Amino acid sequence: MRKSGPPPWRKPLWKALLPWALLAGLAILAYWISVSGLLCNTLGSASQTAPATSGGSSPANQSGDINAQNTIVTATVSSVYDGDTFHARLGDQTETVRVTGVDTPELTRPDYVSAFAQQGGIARDFTVALVDGQTVYLEITAGGERDRYGRLLAYVWLSPPSTDPVVRQTAFIQNTLNGRLISAGMAEPITIAPNTEYAPQIAAAAAEAEAAGRGLWPSGCFSTTSGASDDQTMETGLGPIYPPR
Protein backbone atom coordinates (compact mmCIF):
# COMPACT_ATOMS: atom_id res chain seq x y z
CA MET A 1 0.00 0.00 0.00
CA ARG A 2 1.29 3.54 -0.82
CA LYS A 3 2.00 5.75 2.20
CA SER A 4 0.23 9.08 2.46
CA GLY A 5 2.26 12.32 2.15
CA PRO A 6 3.65 14.63 -0.51
CA PRO A 7 4.85 13.16 -3.75
CA PRO A 8 8.51 12.24 -3.71
CA TRP A 9 9.25 14.81 -6.41
CA ARG A 10 7.88 17.70 -4.33
CA LYS A 11 10.48 19.43 -2.04
CA PRO A 12 9.50 21.15 1.24
CA LEU A 13 8.72 24.88 0.77
CA TRP A 14 11.72 26.13 2.71
CA LYS A 15 14.08 24.06 0.60
CA ALA A 16 12.50 25.51 -2.53
CA LEU A 17 12.85 29.11 -1.33
CA LEU A 18 16.34 28.79 0.15
CA PRO A 19 18.30 29.50 -3.06
CA TRP A 20 16.21 32.61 -3.72
CA ALA A 21 16.71 33.85 -0.15
CA LEU A 22 20.46 33.40 -0.47
CA LEU A 23 20.51 35.30 -3.75
CA ALA A 24 18.48 38.15 -2.21
CA GLY A 25 20.83 38.33 0.77
CA LEU A 26 23.88 38.49 -1.48
CA ALA A 27 22.26 41.25 -3.54
CA ILE A 28 21.51 43.33 -0.42
CA LEU A 29 25.08 42.82 0.86
CA ALA A 30 26.56 43.92 -2.46
CA TYR A 31 24.33 47.02 -2.46
CA TRP A 32 25.45 48.14 1.01
CA ILE A 33 29.10 47.56 0.16
CA SER A 34 28.79 49.78 -2.91
CA VAL A 35 26.93 52.52 -0.97
CA SER A 36 29.52 52.46 1.83
CA GLY A 37 32.36 52.78 -0.65
CA LEU A 38 30.70 55.71 -2.38
CA LEU A 39 30.13 57.47 0.95
CA CYS A 40 33.75 57.05 2.00
CA ASN A 41 34.96 58.39 -1.33
CA THR A 42 32.67 61.41 -1.06
CA LEU A 43 33.84 62.31 2.45
CA GLY A 44 37.46 61.83 1.45
CA SER A 45 37.07 64.15 -1.52
CA ALA A 46 35.35 66.78 0.62
CA SER A 47 38.15 66.78 3.18
CA GLN A 48 40.77 67.17 0.45
CA THR A 49 38.99 69.98 -1.34
CA ALA A 50 37.82 72.01 1.68
CA PRO A 51 39.38 75.50 1.55
CA ALA A 52 42.16 76.23 4.00
CA THR A 53 41.72 78.96 6.61
CA SER A 54 45.32 79.84 7.32
CA GLY A 55 44.44 83.50 7.12
CA GLY A 56 41.66 83.13 9.67
CA SER A 57 38.00 82.49 9.12
CA SER A 58 35.36 85.20 9.20
CA PRO A 59 34.32 84.91 12.83
CA ALA A 60 30.76 86.20 12.48
CA ASN A 61 29.49 86.44 16.03
CA GLN A 62 31.47 83.48 17.20
CA SER A 63 34.33 83.06 19.61
CA GLY A 64 37.56 81.24 19.04
CA ASP A 65 40.88 80.45 20.65
CA ILE A 66 42.60 83.32 18.83
CA ASN A 67 45.00 84.58 21.51
CA ALA A 68 45.22 82.37 24.58
CA GLN A 69 41.64 82.40 25.84
CA ASN A 70 40.64 85.55 23.93
CA THR A 71 37.51 85.65 21.80
CA ILE A 72 36.80 87.24 18.44
CA VAL A 73 33.41 88.74 17.59
CA THR A 74 32.26 90.42 14.43
CA ALA A 75 30.73 93.88 14.79
CA THR A 76 29.51 96.73 12.61
CA VAL A 77 30.51 100.23 13.68
CA SER A 78 27.40 102.40 13.89
CA SER A 79 28.93 105.67 15.15
CA VAL A 80 32.23 107.05 16.41
CA TYR A 81 32.37 109.05 19.63
CA ASP A 82 36.05 109.96 19.67
CA GLY A 83 39.38 108.55 18.56
CA ASP A 84 39.32 105.56 20.88
CA THR A 85 35.60 104.99 21.50
CA PHE A 86 32.80 103.97 19.17
CA HIS A 87 29.40 102.31 19.15
CA ALA A 88 28.91 99.02 17.32
CA ARG A 89 26.22 96.47 16.60
CA LEU A 90 26.93 92.90 17.66
CA GLY A 91 24.00 90.90 16.40
CA ASP A 92 20.91 92.49 17.92
CA GLN A 93 22.87 94.33 20.62
CA THR A 94 24.59 97.72 20.57
CA GLU A 95 27.84 98.05 22.52
CA THR A 96 30.11 100.95 23.40
CA VAL A 97 33.60 99.78 22.45
CA ARG A 98 36.79 101.22 23.98
CA VAL A 99 39.88 100.67 21.81
CA THR A 100 42.21 99.09 24.34
CA GLY A 101 45.94 99.68 24.81
CA VAL A 102 45.87 103.18 23.31
CA ASP A 103 44.53 106.59 24.30
CA THR A 104 43.57 109.57 22.13
CA PRO A 105 43.07 113.17 23.33
CA GLU A 106 39.75 113.87 24.98
CA LEU A 107 36.96 115.88 23.43
CA THR A 108 35.29 118.63 25.45
CA ARG A 109 32.15 117.37 27.16
CA PRO A 110 29.51 119.19 29.20
CA ASP A 111 31.25 118.17 32.42
CA TYR A 112 34.84 118.40 31.20
CA VAL A 113 36.86 120.90 29.20
CA SER A 114 39.70 119.29 27.28
CA ALA A 115 42.84 121.32 26.73
CA PHE A 116 43.41 119.32 23.56
CA ALA A 117 39.90 119.15 22.12
CA GLN A 118 41.20 120.16 18.68
CA GLN A 119 43.65 117.27 18.64
CA GLY A 120 40.88 115.03 19.94
CA GLY A 121 38.79 116.01 16.93
CA ILE A 122 41.65 115.12 14.58
CA ALA A 123 41.98 111.69 16.19
CA ARG A 124 38.23 111.20 15.94
CA ASP A 125 38.29 112.03 12.21
CA PHE A 126 41.08 109.46 11.80
CA THR A 127 38.97 106.76 13.42
CA VAL A 128 35.86 107.74 11.46
CA ALA A 129 37.77 107.36 8.20
CA LEU A 130 38.95 103.87 9.15
CA VAL A 131 35.95 102.17 10.75
CA ASP A 132 32.72 104.18 10.65
CA GLY A 133 30.05 101.98 9.05
CA GLN A 134 32.55 99.16 8.56
CA THR A 135 32.65 95.55 9.70
CA VAL A 136 35.39 95.01 12.29
CA TYR A 137 36.60 92.04 14.32
CA LEU A 138 36.89 92.62 18.05
CA GLU A 139 39.50 90.62 19.95
CA ILE A 140 38.39 90.51 23.57
CA THR A 141 40.88 89.69 26.33
CA ALA A 142 39.79 86.93 28.69
CA GLY A 143 39.27 88.50 32.10
CA GLY A 144 39.56 92.03 30.75
CA GLU A 145 36.35 92.26 28.76
CA ARG A 146 34.98 95.53 30.19
CA ASP A 147 36.02 98.64 32.07
CA ARG A 148 34.23 100.10 35.08
CA TYR A 149 31.70 101.80 32.83
CA GLY A 150 30.69 98.61 31.07
CA ARG A 151 32.45 99.53 27.83
CA LEU A 152 33.71 96.58 25.82
CA LEU A 153 37.53 96.66 25.67
CA ALA A 154 38.82 95.40 22.34
CA TYR A 155 41.66 95.11 19.88
CA VAL A 156 39.87 96.19 16.72
CA TRP A 157 40.97 94.16 13.69
CA LEU A 158 40.14 95.69 10.33
CA SER A 159 40.06 92.26 8.67
CA PRO A 160 39.69 88.72 10.07
CA PRO A 161 42.79 87.99 12.17
CA SER A 162 45.01 85.01 11.48
CA THR A 163 44.87 82.02 13.80
CA ASP A 164 48.68 81.92 13.73
CA PRO A 165 49.98 83.85 16.76
CA VAL A 166 53.23 84.78 15.02
CA VAL A 167 51.34 86.25 12.07
CA ARG A 168 49.01 88.12 14.44
CA GLN A 169 51.85 89.69 16.36
CA THR A 170 53.49 90.81 13.14
CA ALA A 171 50.27 92.08 11.59
CA PHE A 172 48.90 93.88 14.66
CA ILE A 173 50.11 97.42 13.98
CA GLN A 174 49.08 97.45 10.33
CA ASN A 175 45.83 95.53 10.64
CA THR A 176 44.16 96.96 13.74
CA LEU A 177 42.65 100.32 14.59
CA ASN A 178 44.73 100.27 17.78
CA GLY A 179 47.94 99.89 15.79
CA ARG A 180 47.00 102.44 13.13
CA LEU A 181 46.20 105.08 15.78
CA ILE A 182 49.55 104.51 17.48
CA SER A 183 51.70 104.37 14.35
CA ALA A 184 50.08 107.53 12.94
CA GLY A 185 50.77 109.46 16.13
CA MET A 186 47.07 109.83 16.93
CA ALA A 187 47.28 108.07 20.29
CA GLU A 188 49.67 107.25 23.10
CA PRO A 189 50.00 103.83 24.74
CA ILE A 190 48.34 102.77 27.97
CA THR A 191 48.85 99.38 29.58
CA ILE A 192 46.24 98.06 31.96
CA ALA A 193 46.40 94.37 32.86
CA PRO A 194 45.24 91.91 31.72
CA ASN A 195 44.97 93.68 28.34
CA THR A 196 48.68 93.44 27.58
CA GLU A 197 48.88 90.99 24.66
CA TYR A 198 50.22 93.56 22.20
CA ALA A 199 51.86 96.00 24.63
CA PRO A 200 55.38 95.53 23.14
CA GLN A 201 54.16 96.26 19.61
CA ILE A 202 52.18 99.29 20.77
CA ALA A 203 55.09 100.69 22.79
CA ALA A 204 57.55 100.26 19.91
CA ALA A 205 55.23 101.92 17.38
CA ALA A 206 54.53 104.82 19.77
CA ALA A 207 58.23 105.42 20.37
CA GLU A 208 58.82 105.48 16.63
CA ALA A 209 55.95 107.91 16.04
CA GLU A 210 57.16 110.19 18.85
CA ALA A 211 60.75 110.18 17.56
CA ALA A 212 59.52 111.02 14.06
CA GLY A 213 57.23 113.80 15.31
CA ARG A 214 54.33 112.08 13.63
CA GLY A 215 50.68 113.02 13.97
CA LEU A 216 49.72 114.74 17.22
CA TRP A 217 53.03 114.34 19.04
CA PRO A 218 54.34 117.83 18.16
CA SER A 219 51.24 119.44 19.74
CA GLY A 220 52.26 118.35 23.23
CA CYS A 221 49.01 116.53 23.92
CA PHE A 222 50.97 113.44 24.93
CA SER A 223 53.52 113.59 27.72
CA THR A 224 55.88 110.77 26.66
CA THR A 225 55.40 107.28 25.32
CA SER A 226 55.26 106.09 28.93
CA GLY A 227 53.02 108.87 30.22
CA ALA A 228 49.48 108.56 31.50
CA SER A 229 46.49 110.35 30.01
CA ASP A 230 43.06 111.44 31.13
CA ASP A 231 41.54 108.15 30.04
CA GLN A 232 44.22 106.12 31.78
CA THR A 233 43.61 107.83 35.12
CA MET A 234 39.88 107.43 34.53
CA GLU A 235 40.11 103.69 33.93
CA THR A 236 42.56 102.88 36.72
CA GLY A 237 40.95 105.09 39.34
CA LEU A 238 44.09 107.21 39.82
CA GLY A 239 42.43 110.50 38.90
CA PRO A 240 39.10 112.21 38.26
CA ILE A 241 36.18 110.00 37.35
CA TYR A 242 34.28 110.98 34.23
CA PRO A 243 30.98 109.44 33.12
CA PRO A 244 30.99 106.66 30.52
CA ARG A 245 30.82 107.62 26.87
Image (cartoon, rainbow, N blue to C red):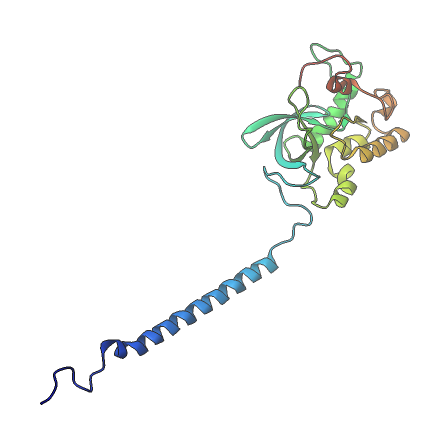
Q: Which residue is more in the foreground, 83 or 232?
A: 232
Instruction: Report which quarter residue 179 is drawn in.
Output: top right
Q: Quadrant of the C terminus?
A: top right
Residue 47 placement, left or right of 156: left
Question: For the view shown, which residue lies furthest in the left direction?
Answer: 1
Q: Quadrant of residue 122?
A: top right
Q: In the figure, is residue 79 to the left or right of 1? A: right
Q: Residue at x 30, y 77 (%)?
A: 18
Residue 168: % across, % down: 74, 42
Q: Extreme front residue here?
A: 1
Left or right of 152 on screen, residue 183: right
Q: Observer-nearest residue: 184 or 172?
A: 172
Q: Position of residue 9 (x, y in %)?
A: 20, 87
**Where does the image place residue 76, in percent across and percent down from the top left?**
61, 32
Q: Residue at x 69, y 47 (%)?
A: 55
**Picture residue at 84% right of the left edge, 34% below the top:** 205
